[in-house]
Image (cartoon, grey):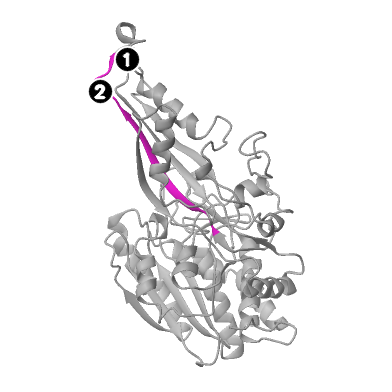
Amino acid sequence: MMPAQLLRKARDFVDSGAFFTELGAMVAYRTESSRPEASVAVSAYLDEVLTPALVGLGCSVRTYDNGDPRGGPFLVGRRVESPGLPTLLCYGHADVVEGQEGRWGEGRDPWTLTAEGERWYGRGAADNKGQHLVNLAALRLLLAEQGRLGFNLTFLFETGEEIGSPGLAEFAAAHRKELRADVLIASDGPRVDAATPTLFLGARGGVQILLDVDLRPDAYHSGNWGGVLRNPATTLAGAVASLVDGHGRIRVPQLLPPELPDAVRESVADVTVAGSPGDPAPDEGWGDTSLTAAERLYAWNTLEVLSLGAADVDRPVNAIPDSARAVLQLRYVAGTDVSRIGEVIAEHLAKDGYSMVDVTVAGRFPAGRTPLDDPWVGWAKAALERVAERPVTVLPNIGGSLPHAVFTDVLGLPALWLPHSYPGCLQHAPDEHLLAPIAREGLVLATALFHALGRPTPELPLPRP
């Protein structure tokens, strides 16, 4: 069991304001990976924030260039206490989405951490600077208290997660030896709700699909030509409805998972979706109603229309448009075969009479999932519940996406995620925030988990290699 004084120090680090001050300094770096001009801020964040933090943990630190020109550098810190000890791989991402200045409430500046009650507003406060600060601080507390971690540590930071982690899988493959570990424990994404400690084991993947109906070079008067010229917008609407109906139900069997495993169904049986104040309520009758809301979100696929348009929707004229476009996204769970998704959709549309619709796969990121019965899952849940003093929810995966598959499929590791945020944190939007109670409990949980890794007991032994 974690010593009481270490538990107290974890809580005091947040309650004293030290965590807030350190996070404020991190938020001030404008590490927007979607803006090439932000590469200077990204490099400064690695050099001025993360490198000193890792050196303070006794790590040797090295920065690597990214072989993919779309992505930024990688930072790896390594501390080896003994070759015979287990090795922990941690992960975080230094980049954030665009700040969206001028759109935040109450005139807030996205690059200045602002406390309003229990909400700490700032870009990256929840995604991901506040979350990797929790883990860095937990390791720091553990090392200061004990003089050693009791395990070897490798910490990997990337700088392009918000733009799809370009180059990460290739970097991991090329540096397998350096990144070799027994388990990944990292923090990103949300808890199931603000009040529930959560461990999740993977992420849904995503495929972006463009549907284009480009029928002629000009628009034609709707009175003179209506009824004899095919309307691209009408055609596009029909094509979309052929793939996913007006109630959110996928109509192409090949876009669905092959099954919903019993273990996955059982893991989300008691999970409530939208359990925090201010969350939108799930809509009745939306999606596959044979599934629960939790099953639809965490264990099934969804095909979403992200944008849809033809001509000038704000200033329409009396003309049949020349073209129309829709952008769709398939969010899918592990086990779904998306290798031929473009061909599958094109074949389905042609069979349904929409051969004039062009299908383009614009981008994709893989799904991944650590098996629910992996021994590290049971170990982590037991270690967390000893200090949380209430059940910890284990999700098969979150509904969103992370580079989980890099760790499971490329590095061959069990990968566990201990999130320190919640669904209503407004990540990727104006007014992103971290909740102070989650930061406080998150630091306690992370410290306890790392303590259990370095101090196994007969009651809580480490899984065998």
Please tell me how crowded label 1 is: few (under 14), some (14-19), or many (20+) other residues with Cα within 10 Å: few
The answer to whether marks 2 and 1 mark residues whose Cβ atoms lie closer than 8 Å is yes
| Magenta span main SS | strand
Q: Report x, y in % for residue 300.
A: 59, 48
All told, the count of numbered labels is 2
The part of the chain drawn in magenta is: 203-220
Residue 208 lies in the magenta-colored region: yes
Q: Is mark 1 on a helix, strand or loop?
A: loop
Would residue 433 appear left or right of 5 to someone viewing this image?
left
| Residue 285, horizontal then vertical, whole percent | 66, 33
The amino acid on which the numbered mark 1 sits, given as a three-letter code, is Leu
**Is 129 in front, or is 106?**
129
Say whether disc 2 or disc 1 marks the residue closer to the N-terminus.
2
262 or 161: nearer the eye?
262
Residue on which the image places disc 1? 229
As drawn, the residue found furthest toward the left would be: 217
Q: Is residue 409 above or below residue 182?
A: above
Query: Relative to residue 259, is residue 220 drawn left or right?
Result: left
Q: In which quarter of the image is the N terminus?
A: bottom right
Find residue 241 and name its label.
none
Residue 284 shows in this picture: yes
Residue depicted at x 34% and y 75%: 174
Amino acid type, mark 2: Arg
Give the residue pinned by disc 2.
Answer: 216
Whether 423 is among the magenta residues is no
